[in-house]
Image (cartoon, rainbow, N blue to C red):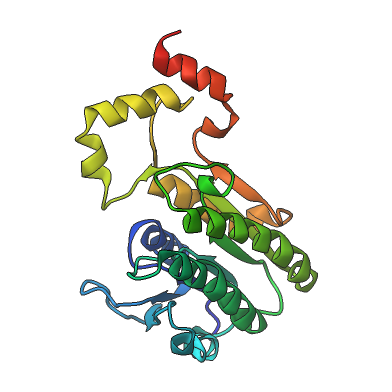
Amino acid sequence: MNEQHAVVVGGTRGLGRIVVQKFLARGYAVSVVSRHKPADFEDSQRLRHFAADLEKSETFANLPAQIRDAFGPISYLVLSQRFRGEGDRWAGEMQVGLTASRALVEGLAPHFADQGDRAIAVVSSAYAEFAGSSQAAGYHAVKAGLNAMVRYYAVTLGRKGIRVNAIMPMTHLKPESRAFYEGNEKSMDAYRRLVPLGRLGTAEESADAIDFLCSARASFINGQSLFVDGGVSVVWQEEVAKIFTGL
């Protein structure tokens, strides 16, 4: 096929789904990978769903070739999955976040196009660099590990012309959570005081960052993990304490 081809892992909800919509708007054929196909997801000539349980490596061993056969060589790959299963959370986070990511990157890399702009974008998190009790130890370790993998593959795949970068969002408004946050004035006031831009960001804004990184506009950006946090990461903790204590 002559259409450019993008692959989005975890592309059926939240940020991943918005990324899919942006690729479609750019005229790309899009392969979407997730555990289940949503009821409102319809395959078309430019959109196809591939079911894979990333907790079980055997379910996606043949996935790269199937994706390549569906829409041809790949230009962009976005990894937006996260562990949502039950059982041992540490093991689940490691499998879905790191082991599956490694397998997908190394399995799909040989199926990338030979020319043109090519890139991989990884959805990491602010928890890759900072610690917080709202997420478990495994989540922190996985996101930090993803940033390290981005640097590694930026070097090894960069030699083949494939750029690799990550975004690190803080909490943002997604279609699934917008009503919850906007209905909690106390929470929204806390974000207005914390974030230098005075508001929560949106999943659309994080998707815009991915859309940029997966484009020729970012043709010389490689190996970077970009905060998408309205400036929170540059505020000294002492200043944050003063903001919330009124000092």
Image coordinates of residue 107 in percent, x first then y, are 60, 83
Observer able to see residue 74: no
Q: Residue at x 47, y 70 (%)?
A: 91
- 154, 96: nearer the viewer: 96
Image coordinates of residue 85 in percent, x first then y, are 34, 69
Observer able to see residue 218: yes
Q: Residue at x 43, y 88 (%)?
A: 59
- 54, 106: nearer the viewer: 54
Q: Left or right: 231 with respect to 183?
A: right
Image coordinates of residue 49 in percent, x first then y, are 37, 80
- 66 to 162, vertically: above or below: below
Q: Quadrant of residue 162?
A: bottom right
- 7, 226: nearer the viewer: 226
Q: Residue at x 56, y 77 (%)?
A: 104
Image coordinates of residue 57 in percent, x first then y, are 49, 84
Q: Residue at x 52, y 42 (%)?
A: 131
User: Please, which residue is most extreme toward the front here?
Assistant: 88
Q: Left or right: 181 with respect to 215?
A: left
- 205 to 185, vertically: above or below: below
Q: Quadrant of residue 193?
A: top left
